Image: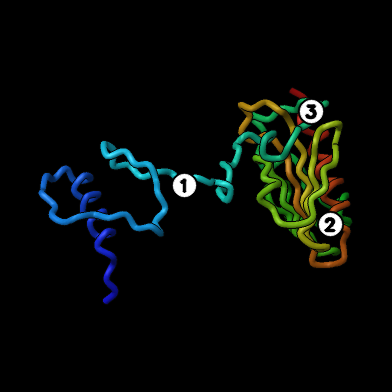
Amino acid sequence: MHLRPAAVLAALSLTLLAATGCAAEVKGTATADPNATQEASDPTTTSRKAPASTANSKPATPTAPQQQQGKVKISTKKKATGLETCGVLKAADIEAATGGKSSADGGCIHTTTGPSAVITQIVTVPDILEQDGEKKQIEIGGNTAWQVAASKEDCQVTVMLTDDPAAITSAFSVSVLAIDDLDTCATALKLATEGFNRIPNA
């Protein structure tokens, strides 16, 4: 068993007694370890010091969409409350953009055949920073938007509807996942623009 120097044991005993409030006589002589780093200590406190450096600490994630995604430009403020979350685009819109046949009339998820693809639409909270893929900031109707391409077959376009900090779902987003050959980013952009134009102005 490795024994610590007597000085360290004596110092540890004194610290434990001070921390617990116990009064006990400690016999022996404590000597300073010449290799030890000297630190100023307050014998009246038992709290530990915070680390001197927090350079490696992760900053708190901002909650507001504008802070998350950077500066947001809003030229056309859109209605962001009371919308049908998944009903902005209809089957006809999906079919016109993809050239395929949609299996649903409205709803969050449309699947198409000829070409085969899955299209998701939602009025949502923008979460661009959380997504993996190639990100590009664009504009739709004068409002800040983002295109995120996870791959050639998977692309999402999200457009801001408002910069009102009280709005919870402040963006409209369309994702296109293609099984067959389809320009997913061009399709997502077309559908996001169609949905943006359809949402009433605030």
Q: Is residue 69 visible?
A: yes
In 3D space, how far apart are the residues under numbered discs 3 and 1 (Cα atoms)? 42 Å
In 3D space, how far apart are the residues under numbered discs 3 and 2 (Cα atoms)? 25 Å
Q: Which residue is depicted at the point 85% across and 46% down? A: 189
**First in sequence: mark 3 or mark 1?**
1
Q: Are marks 2 and 1 in contact (CB under 8 Å)?
A: no
Circle 3 packing at 10 Å, graded few (<14), some (14-19), many (20+), is many
Of residues 157 and 108, the one drawn nearer to the viewer in this rendering: 157
Badge number at residue 116? none
Provide the residue designation for mark 1: 51
**First in sequence: mark 3 or mark 2?**
3
Q: Amino acid at mark 1?
A: Pro
- Measuring from the top left, give residue 110's x and y in whole percent: 73, 54
Is 144 rendered above or below residue 135?
A: above
**First in sequence: mark 2 or mark 1?**
1
Closer mark to the observer between disc 3 and disc 2: 3
Q: Amino acid at mark 2?
A: Thr
Provide the residue designation for mark 3: 74
Q: Which residue is depicted at the point 78% across and 59% down? A: 154
SS type, badge 3:
loop
Q: Which residue is depicted at the point 73% across and 44% down? A: 173
Provide the residue designation for mark 2: 184
Q: Which residue is depicted at the point 74% across and 22% down? A: 202
Circle 1 packing at 10 Å, graded few (<14), some (14-19), many (20+), is few
